[in-house]
């Protein structure tokens, strides 16, 4: 997720517990979605769509926090 902000993500994960939790939850959802996509797990379409929306929401939150961090670090 957001690989171009690797340095900021590393810093935020150590400095901000809320960011670390968002990042961890996003990655867990990504793993679950990938497991469904590869057939290792099964969900109906509605359940999968809900996971994808939640993952996107977390990514948006993480991105906003990264942008705020970048502003403060200037």
Image: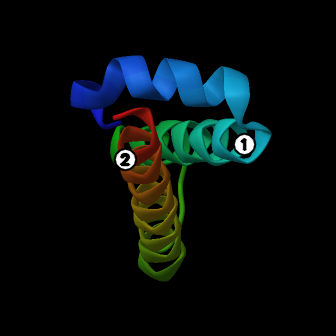
- Mark 2 vs mark 1, CA separation in Å: 21 Å
Report helix, strand or loop for mark 1: helix
Figure coloring? rainbow
> For residue 52, what is the image quadrant?
bottom left
Residue at the spot x=51%, y=18% of the render?
Answer: 10
Residue receiving disc 1: 21
Residue at the spot x=51%, y=76% of the render?
Answer: 50
First-in-chain label (2 vs 1): 1
Report helix, strand or loop for mark 2: helix
Q: Position of residue 45 (x, y in %)?
A: 42, 76
Q: Position of residue 17 (x, y in %)?
A: 78, 38
Q: Is residue 33 left or right of residue 37?
A: right
Residue receiving disc 2: 71
Residue at the spot x=33%, y=35% of the render?
Answer: 74
- Eyeballing the image, is 51 above or below 35? below
Please rate how many residues cluster around mark 2, counting C-alpha atoms within 10 Å: few if below 14, some from 14 to 19, many from 20.
Answer: few
**Mark linked to residue 43:** none
Please rate how many residues cluster around mark 1, counting C-alpha atoms within 10 Å: few if below 14, some from 14 to 19, many from 20.
Answer: some
Q: How many marks?
A: 2
Q: Position of residue 70 (x, y in %)?
A: 37, 40
Q: Position of residue 28 (x, y in %)?
A: 61, 39
- Eyeballing the image, is 22 above or below 48? above
Furthest-right residue in view? 17
Disc 2 versus disc 1: nearer the observer: 2
Mark 2 vs 1: CB contact within 8 A: no
Q: Quadrant of the N terminus?
A: top left
In this view of the protein, which residue sits in the foreground, 30 or 67?
A: 67
In this view of the protein, which residue sits in the foreground, 23 or 19?
A: 19
Q: Is residue 42 left or right of residue 52?
A: right
- Eyeballing the image, is 62 above or below 10? below
């Amino acid at each position: 997720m957001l690989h171009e902000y690797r340095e900021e993500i590393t810093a935020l994960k150590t400095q901000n517990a809320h960011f670390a939790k968002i990042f961890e939850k996003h990655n867990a959802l990504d793993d679950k979605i990938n497991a469904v996509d590869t057939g290792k797990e099964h969900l109906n379409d509605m359940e999968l769509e809900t996971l994808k929306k939640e993952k996107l929401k977390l990514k948006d939150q993480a991105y906003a926090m990264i942008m705020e961090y970048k502003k403060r670090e200037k």
